[in-house]
Image (cartoon, helix red, strand yellow):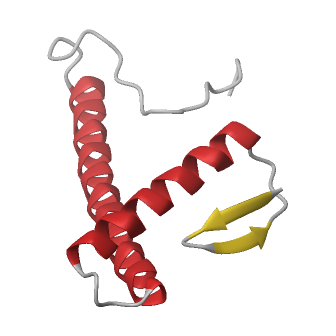
Amino acid sequence: MTLNLAGQEFRLASDSSVEYMRALEAEINRRVREIQNQYPQQSTSRCALLAMLSMTDELTKLRSEFAEVDRKISELRTLRDGEKTAVTAPVKRPFERKKPVGV
């Protein structure tokens, strides 16, 4: 498939769906345009790099927040295992796989 990112064509192979890849393309181009509107004197490549910096910042912050949530879930599991009456409902992590029976 070919994506147009900030005016450049990229031919890519991906296991992801075409719809997903098009959504990524649209989001990247939206962010680059947003930077271009804020800094019209900057080149497209510089705007793309600033958009990438912004997206990486968001990703890093989300990973940190997820790690904190995961830590809190672990604390709740410890509380649940140590004090059976404190927590009655199971707490599951997102995308957690069930353990096979007998393990």
Q: Residue at x 27, y 48 (%)?
A: 71
Q: Position of residue 72 (x, y in %)?
A: 22, 42
| Residue 97 shows in the view | yes
Picture quarter containing residue 80?
top left
- The residue sitting at 28% across, 37% down in the picture is 73
Image quadrant assignment for residue 83: top left
**Residue found at x 47% / y 53%:** 27
70 in relation to 77, above or below? below
- Measured along the vertical axis of the image, is residue 4 above or below residue 91? below
Give how far across and how far down residue 14 sits, in percent: 80, 55
Residue 40 as seen in the image, left or right of residue 103: left
Q: Is residue 103 above or below residue 50?
A: above
Quarter the C terminus occupies: top right
Measured as percent of width and height from the top left, residue 51 is found at: 37, 73
Q: Quadrant of the N terminus?
A: bottom right
User: In this view of the protein, which residue sits in the foreground, 63 or 30?
Assistant: 30
Quadrant assignment, res 2: bottom right
Q: Furthest residue to the left?
A: 86
Q: Looking at this view, is 98 or 53 the one in front? A: 53
Return the residue found at the far front: 41
Instruction: Please state if 85 lies on the left or on the right of 41 as rendered.
Output: left
Q: Is residue 78 left or right of residue 93?
A: left
Q: Is residue 85 left or right of residue 90?
A: left
Tally of numbered discs? 0
| Residue 17 in sight here | no
